Image (spheres, rainbow, N blue to C red):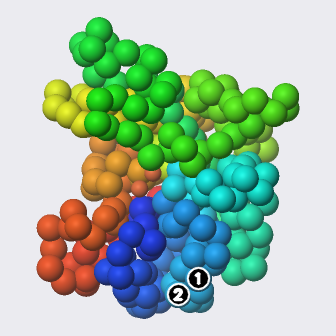
């Protein structure tokens, strides 16, 4: 099965990001993959996510959506109206996907022919930070998502309340989402799948070395959490792990030697290419399963 994937369209970042999205739909219909995975960070407002799926248009194959951290951002005005990130993750985004005929992977695994897809947003627990700088950049800085002049954008807009109404910390959110992954894996365990593919917005393995420069030594703490990869390692049929979030194109391996890849669009201001078609050449990737 030939599977296409990309992530981090960030259509609310620039007009170029939005124009790329229309081209993405055309490219998909020309390439005719057998499945397409969009692995998070489309836009901060569900209406814009809906517009984006409309702009991509009719996919030529089953299309799977994974939520990213930007997709669950709730504006301060919405927060005052009582909305939180669970409303995005568990109600608004699945409704947008249902309206457009996309499968919402955060809520259910999917079996296509003999390939099972599992995954979801994932989250971070600061494990990937540059630990050699712990005396300087402390866990308190990570919990506050603020260090010096650097801020992690989820600081004010990712808002996941627990049952008592208090906000969950990042470790608790990871625990909650890891239990959702376990439930997906139990469901897929009984499926007649030859192969299992996992797709997470955040990086589920400690596969990146701290770059030893700012702000990346700080931001890497928000890249992902290894507990998701530890769960995936128990799936013997696992053939590939795809992710997004880091705004790079990477071809890595898990400790067990499974391909671990991302192919992000990212912000137009960071694109090395001058033509949108070239941006797509880089950021729309394929994997044969
Ligand atoms: Fe992103
Ligand atoms: Fe992200």
Q: Quadrant of ligand 1?
A: bottom left
Q: Residue 58: horizontal and vertical position, in percent?
A: 59, 89
- Residue 248, compared with residue 178, is above or below; it is below
Q: Assess mark 1: CB under 8 A from ligand 1? A: no
Mark 2: give few (<14), some (14-19) or many (20+) Cα within 10 Å: some
- Residue 122, compared with residue 245, is above or below; it is above
Q: Secondary structure at mark 1?
A: helix
- Is 35 left, or right, of 79 in this rendering? left
Of 161 and 243, the residue lying toward us: 161
Of 193 and 53, the residue lying toward us: 53
Q: Residue 130: horizontal and vertical position, in percent?
A: 28, 22
Could you say which quadrant of the image residue 252 lies in?
A: top left
Q: Is residue 87 visible?
A: no
Could you say which quadrant of the image residue 275 lies in?
A: bottom left
Q: Which mark is residue 166?
A: none
Q: Secondary structure at mark 2?
A: helix
Could you say which quadrant of the image residue 189 lies in?
A: top right
Name the residue that disc number 1 marks. Answer: 51
Q: Which mark is residue 55?
A: 2
Q: Residue 70: horizontal and vertical position, in percent?
A: 52, 56
- Residue 129, compared with residue 4, is above or below; it is above
- Residue 205, compared with residue 17, is above or below; it is above
At 64% from the left and 76% from the top, the residue drawn is 47
Mark 1: give few (<14), some (14-19) or many (20+) Cα within 10 Å: some
Q: Closer to the observer: label 1 or label 2?
A: 1
- Label 1, label 2: how far apart the Cα atoms are: 6 Å
At 54% from the left and 44% from the top, the residue drawn is 156
At 69% from the left and 59% from the top, the residue drawn is 78
Q: Are marks 1 and 2 in contact (CB under 8 Å)?
A: yes
Q: Is residue 270 visible?
A: yes
Of 117 and 134, the residue lying toward us: 134
Q: Residue 195: horizontal and vertical position, in percent?
A: 57, 50
């Amino acid at each position: 099965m030939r599977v296409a994937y990309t992530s981090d369209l960030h259509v609310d970042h620039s007009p170029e990001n939005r124009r790329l999205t229309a081209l993405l739909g055309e490219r998909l219909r020309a390439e005719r993959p057998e499945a397409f995975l969009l692995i998070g960070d489309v836009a901060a407002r569900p209406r814009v996510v809906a517009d984006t799926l409309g702009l991509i248009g009719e996919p030529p194959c089953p299309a799977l959506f994974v939520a990213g951290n930007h997709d669950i951002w709730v504006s301060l005005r919405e927060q005052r109206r009582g909305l939180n990130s669970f409303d995005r993750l568990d109600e608004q985004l699945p409704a947008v996907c249902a309206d457009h005929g996309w499968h919402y992977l955060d809520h259910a695994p999917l079996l296509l022919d003999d390939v099972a897809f599992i995954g979801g947003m994932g989250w971070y627990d600061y494990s990937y930070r540059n630990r050699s700088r712990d005396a300087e950049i402390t866990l308190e800085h990570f919990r506050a998502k603020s260090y010096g002049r650097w801020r992690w954008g989820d600081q004010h807009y990712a808002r996941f309340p627990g049952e008592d109404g208090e906000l969950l910390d990042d470790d608790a959110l990871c625990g909650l989402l890891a239990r959702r992954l376990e439930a997906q894996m139990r469901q897929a365990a009984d499926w007649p799948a030859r192969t299992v593919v996992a797709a997470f917005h955040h990086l589920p393995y400690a596969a990146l070395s701290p770059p030893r420069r700012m702000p990346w030594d700080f931001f890497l703490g928000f890249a992902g959490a290894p507990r998701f990869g530890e769960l995936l390692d128990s799936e013997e049929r696992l053939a590939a792990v795809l992710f997004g979030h880091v705004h790079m194109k990477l071809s890595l391996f898990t400790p067990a030697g499974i391909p671990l890849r991302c192919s992000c669009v990212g912000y137009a201001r960071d694109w090395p290419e001058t033509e949108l078609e070239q941006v797509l050449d880089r950021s729309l990737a394929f994997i044969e399963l």
